[in-house]
Amino acid sequence: MEPGTDRTGARHIRLTSHSGGPLAPPIRWGAPTPAERGPIVGTTGNRAHRNVIGTHSGSYGVYRALAVAAGALSPQHRADLTNTAPTDVIGPYPQWQNPDAIVSLDPWGAAVADVFADQLAADHDIRPTIAVTKAHVMLPEIAEALQKGRLRPDGRILLAGGAAVVTKVAVEPVWYLPGVAARFGCDEAALRRALFEETGGMYPELVTRGDLEVFLPPIGGQTVYIFGDPRDLADPAVELTARVHDECNGSDVFGSDICTCRPYLTHAIEECIAGTQRGGVGLVAYSRKEGRALGEVTKFLVYNARKRQVGGDTADQYFARTECVAGVQDMRFQELMPDVLHWLGITRIHRLVSMSNMKYDAITGSGISVGERVNIPDELIPADARVEIDAKMAAGYFTPGPVPDAEDLKKTVGRGLA
Ligand SMILES: [Zn+2]
């Protein structure tokens, strides 16, 4: 009998709102060993083994469904993990055993083929939620830094052709719902209900299966770029230069000049390379939270509203225009961001390449100490991005210079829509 069919061959839909099978391994979040913690099983191939709500690959789970619907992918496909092991071993670190320190990723997610080998051999479909590889990154800004003599190749971190040698890590979200609720200071039942209702009822188990405490949300994850030896990240004696960056496709990839995202990102990479060459280690943690997690459609609507308002695009109206369209000024909520830093064993950031008070507060509030804060140099701020940076500095962003006052903000005016 084909999976998903009854004896007559008719397809039926299997609802997920009743108890799982006895074969689903229990999850004890924060347990000291992988055996005690148990694997995260989000497979749709064998319902009896599932011990989470949702499925793997974040938002790409929807594309997987399309591939199945189109007949291009067998829903029973099992990943062949031969030769996919991490290039660098990360951890385990003491933070992995603290159920409060990490609530939005699976610390064992890179090592499943190793630590859950027995269950894999026993036909459990356990998938990595973290992958670790090596890369050379080539950026025109780094080539320019070489040309101008700000950076020098060393043949190890930075090659003569301008390529920086990195370890990069892709992380999918794995949410421990009681821990996520605690971070946001809300009731777990309220969190589950909002997740259920505000996704249009996408995951009924959020409200029907209180026994399932782990949710694989259909959102983007994070990518971490490490300059130098990843093991040095956990050593507070080694100088760590770090930036936590939230995705901005328009600037990061296409070079739009309305914000400082790409120039700040490439400045951070330059600082990471220089710091690593001094004997330190560098880190850029890149989160998929486009447009303050409001998405690009909202972001572009806000751009129009800013540039068409009476008086033009002024810094004093910067946050108000976002709030008019989106209902909030920002949806990034940095509460979960430090998890990836704890996963890497970080306890101290010597140089934080960020001016955001929200990121700083989240990092230090989670127990990681921060030394120096590195602002974006003035000459790297595009003219049209002055509106954003002045508004943010007035709202509490770190700046070593004067903080603009209300009168200053009225005078910072961006370009029109031409
Ligand atoms: Zn941006």
Image (cartoon, rainbow, N blue to C red):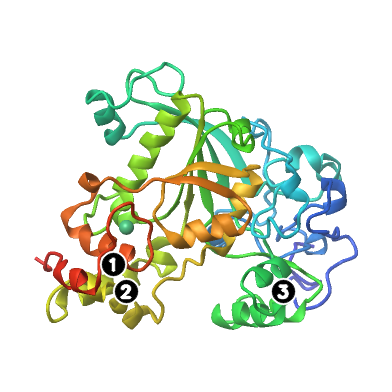
Of the two numbered discs 3 and 2 in the rendering, the one whose residue sits closer to the viewer = 2
What secondary structure is marked by label 1? helix
Q: Tell me where residue 272 appears, x and y as whole percent.
A: 43, 35
Left or right: 215, with 303 as reference point = right
Q: Are marks 3 and 2 in contact (CB under 8 Å)?
A: no
- Image quadrant of residue 162? top left
Q: CA distance from mark 3 to mark 2?
A: 55 Å
In primary-sequence order, the first of circles 1 and 2 is: 2
Given residues 3 and 375, the one toward you in this image is: 375
At 35% from the left and 79% from the top, the residue drawn is: 323
Question: 10 Å neighbourhood of mark 1: few (<14), some, or many (≥20)?
Answer: many
- Residue denoted by label 2: 319
Task: Estimate the spatial distance between the alpha carbons at disc 1 and disc 2, rounded to whole Å.
Answer: 8 Å
User: What amino acid type is highlighted by mark number 2?
Assistant: Phe
Q: Position of residue 221 (x, y in %)?
A: 54, 55
Choose between 374 and 227: the one closer to the eye: 374
Q: Which mark is residue 56?
A: none
Residue under the point 80% across and 40% down: 115
Task: Please say whether residue 136 is visible from this viewpoint.
Answer: no
Q: Which residue is mark 1?
A: 391
Q: Nearer the viewer, residue 180 or 208?
A: 180
Observer-nearest residue: 407 or 314?
407
Mark 3 or 2, nearer chain start: 3
Mark 3 vs mark 1: give the one in front. Answer: 1
Q: Position of residue 306 (x, y in %)?
A: 21, 74
